[in-house]
Amino acid sequence: MKKRKICLIITTRGNYAKMKSVIELIRADPALELQLILGGGAILHKYGNISQSIIGMGVKIDRIIHFLIEGENPVTMAKSAGLAVTEFSTAFENLSPEVVIVIADRFECLPIAMSAVYMNIPVAHVEGGEVSGSIDESIRHAITKLSHIHFPATKDAALRIERMGERPETIFTVGATSLDVIARLNLTDINPLMEAQRATGVGAIVDLSKPYLVVIQHPVTTEYANNLKHINETIEAISTLRLGTIWIWPNMDAGSDGISKGIRMFRERKDVNDIHFFKSLPIELFAPLMKNCACIIGNSSSGVREAAFLGVPSVNIGSRQSGRERGKNVVDVASNGREITDAILAQINVGAYQPDFLYGDGNSGSKIVNILKHYNYSIQKKIAY
């Protein structure tokens, strides 16, 4: 029996966490063939190279693609996207996939979708239809209009996709795939996290048996000039609280140089003795880290999506997640040190929330793979109204 070739592209550690269950299920299905491509931040040391981790799990990597141009500014982001079109079109020509899975809304996902569509390869889009801030908002909806099958995480997202003129029979509400891994982990054991602090990252060894914070703040590309100012407001709040903190480095979007500069200057201060900094963490460590923290702070989608599923108090800063569906566990604040401090204290006082299944129940991957296997793809698209 001829296997259907499904091509999946991982460009960040976060995307690997999202797609881990899908990867495992495709590999286990005799009717499917996984083609795995790694690129971008997923293969760079500064963003936590995950290629060896994947190889160590016995997963074959079919292509490794370098397309990121150093600089983390709007010009290099645009040029990196252009280079991605060239590199991924070559990979698709060599691999001849029958379906390409595109994940969410990162800037490099648009050129991936473009390359596939120009080459008459159907595109399956995961996590379309959501509302957020930054350039992600525009990229996500552009990918939707290029895609042939849609896997939104929520009912509202599915309705938006339909309103964009996509045919209802191409839209399947499946939930968030990142929850699949989390739902199957032991989230009570923090000993591996203590060991990770001793083995990797820099800074103090934070006692995770006591209340601690998790900070993840990424750049906002549409507010490029203000990213250093924004991170300094967050730093002011964390400095005021004096709680043990695990701080995870920003992603590779334009503006991360400003965020990184602020963190480095902060890290060199003599009074920073209760914070540990990681470049990144695998989902197997990040999930228990988040589950057991007193509050997650910043502007990562994890503070909205996974935190809701785990019932973790979250303080969302600024506009990066503006408009994204959220549970009661999220408090929104501006990039203002005093506001951030007050919100964190209020969230710690509230404590854990009830789990919210707004983004699914942890069984998304099996739904996606079953549909990918049986779906009758048509490369020709027409608007539905």
Image (spheres, helix red, strand yellow):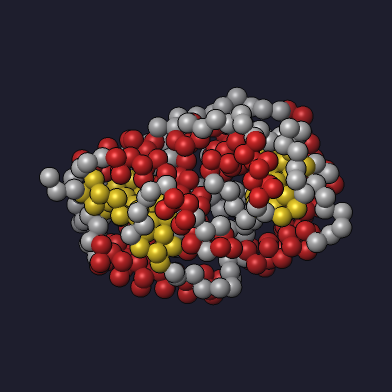
Q: Which residue is farthest left?
A: 1
Q: Quadrant of residue 291?
A: top right
Is 132 in front, or is 13? 13
Q: Residue at x 68, y 61 (%)?
A: 259
Q: Is residue 29 visible?
A: yes
Task: List x then y, in percent, for residue 360.
Answer: 45, 32
User: Residue 48, image x and y in percent?
Assistant: 56, 57
Residue at 36 percent across and 57 percent down: it is 61
- Front one among 286 and 232: 286
Residue at the location (40% across, 64% down)?
A: 64
Towards the viewer: 200 or 326: 200
Where residue 78 appears, x then y in whole percent?
A: 49, 72
Q: Within the image, what quadrant is residue 195 found in?
A: top right
Q: Is residue 149 left or right of residue 363?
A: left
The image shows a total of numbered marks equal to 0
> Please, is residue 202 above or below residue 240 in the view?
below
- On screen, residue 315 versus residue 91, left or right, reads right
Q: Position of residue 328 (x, y in %)?
A: 62, 31
| Residue located farthest toward the right when viewing the structure as drawn | 271
Q: Which quadrant of the figure has residue 220?
A: bottom right
Compare residues 164 and 91 and report the one nearer the observer: 91
Q: Residue at x 75, y 53 (%)?
A: 203
* Image-based side of 38 in relation to 294, left or right: left
Considering the image in quadrants, where does the N terminus appear? top left
**Can residue 130 be seen by looking at this rendering?**
no
Q: Relative to residue 281, is residue 152 drawn left or right?
A: left
